Image (spheres, grey):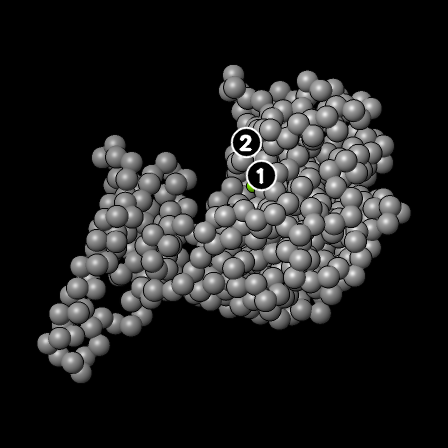
Amino acid sequence: MTSWEIRQKYLHFFESRGHAVTPSSSLIPAGDPTLLFTNAGMVPFKDIFLGLESPRTSRAVSIQKCIRAGGKHNDLDRVGFTRRHHTFFEMMGNFSFGDYFKSEAIAYAWEFLTQELAIHPDRLWITIFRDDDEAMALWSALPGVDPSRIVRLGEKDNFWQMGDTGPCGPCSEILVDQGPAFSCGSPDCMVGCDCDRYLEIWNLVFMQFNRSKDGVLTPLPRPSIDTGMGLERISAIMAGATSNYETDLFLPLINSISEKAKVPYENGNGPLDYAFRVIADHLRSGVFLLHEGVIPSNEGRGYVLRRILRRAIQFSLELELPSPVLSNLARQTVIMMHQPYPELEQSLSRIEAVLSHEEDRFTRTLSEGLPVLRGFIDEVISRNEKVLPGEMLFKLHDTHGFPIDVCEDVARHQGIHLDFKGFEEKMEEQRERGRQSWVGKKEDFPVPSSRIATPVSFLGYERDQVMGEVLLL
Ligand code: ATP
Ligand code: MG
Ligand code: MG
Ligand code: MG
């Protein structure tokens, strides 16, 4: 079954059960400064859940474009290294705004998976929030559900929230057991393990509360339903594929990358296949974000986009892809996503131009800084150490204008961590020197402006918050 067929089946299933088919809204949440990107299917309906807006319909179904890079749900660093996480993905969801609740949501999901998609119940597991006895009873009563396959989990897995504030509630999830070959091998590997064996495919959220800034939960006006199933994951299951990347949502692009690369793609099992995955994933995000008008920059959404594009370029070096990498692959990305998103084509030439400019700029920075960084890493390894000292980081940043997030990506790959504290101390010393010379000679600017790390209010990455700054290229 192709991903297109799955889209159609999902929309029809819920449409024929009274849900209004609703087109995906933008990746940029309308009028919501608390959220970097749309990170789930419920985001466009947030005000309806909160009772601030009255719904035009009490049941809706959608396939929502999502980005999980930055913010509360941030999968950027996992991409390429699991078989199931992306920065850009599509979430299929059915919603009830004060209409049906747990019982129908559970029954619909089970019917869709086991009847419509004909997935055998023996492959499925269920999780529920630890004290949700009602969900336990509802699941156990369904035909084909084995109660010993219903697992109670805690807040981390089974209490869903969009962000630090906003609508939230206990949830129940459906997982597919992909078999021991997918296990991390730990004797504790079971439902809830973070490896690929028990693949979480669908989350049914029983939307009951609003979390305020001070963490207090207030009941929502009407208990509602919000569900989310990753299209890429269910497509992998239906294609009998070993990963999301081996489906029609990625393979045409991976094949194009592979034609240009010096290294072969080995169906997901090769030693450098993670680089193909990262590049393909990041191109999808890049193309969609650029189409929606986000431009690479040093703050907010533009910074996340810049980071995504730079990461793709960085990984392309491992495959020795001829440059420019990104602009050469944009067309294939647009073709691959054409059927559901024909509108991308109109932006293609603009997307190619921005990608080419961004890549050009970043390649110059990399070619200067990367050999120095590699030299530093070799030095650390030869001393049998595991931490790249703050002084080296400072030199890379200050003398070579090299971004610290790229240092982190490259170093982590070789098992080396960065001494952020030492780096911050060096930065502070530099600021202090700047302040002193400023006092002495008021007419001079203390340090060359291109070398200043400018404080920005970026809420995406924890580390950036700790450091309080990101680095200008
Ligand atoms: P995981 O535990 O695998 O990271 P999650 O619990 O963070 O997933 P939810 O917030 O429950 O995910 O989102 C609902 C569904 O969206 C998931 O069950 C999954 O099918 C899909 N999904 C979530 N994150 C991603 C991602 N980064 N890439 C692809 N699909 C995703
Ligand atoms: Mg997650
Ligand atoms: Mg989860
Ligand atoms: Mg989940």
Residue 264 appears in view: no
Measured Cα–Cα span from mark 2 to mark 1: 7 Å
Instruction: Please name whichever residue, 434 or 256, is drawn nearer the observer in this view of the structure.
Output: 434
How far across and down, in percent of the image, does residue 68 sit? 56, 50
Q: Residue at x 79, y 51 (%)?
A: 59
Q: Residue at x 83, y 46 (%)?
A: 14
Q: Quadrant of residue 447?
A: bottom left
Q: Residue at x 73, y 65 (%)?
A: 343
- The three-letter amino acid code for the residue at tag 1 is Phe
How far across and down, in percent of the image, does residue 302 sit? 50, 64
Determine whether, in the image, residue 368 is placed left or right of residue 114.
left
Q: Which residue is under mark 2?
A: 154
Q: Residue at x 27, y 61 (%)?
A: 398
How far across and down, in percent of the image, does residue 232 sit? 69, 43
Which mark is on residue 159? Answer: 1
Q: Is residue 459 above or below residue 13?
A: below
How far across and down, in percent of the image, does residue 285 sit? 60, 55
- The three-letter amino acid code for the residue at tag 2 is Gly
Marks 2,1: beta carbons within 8 A:
yes
Quarter of the image with the N terminus in it: top right
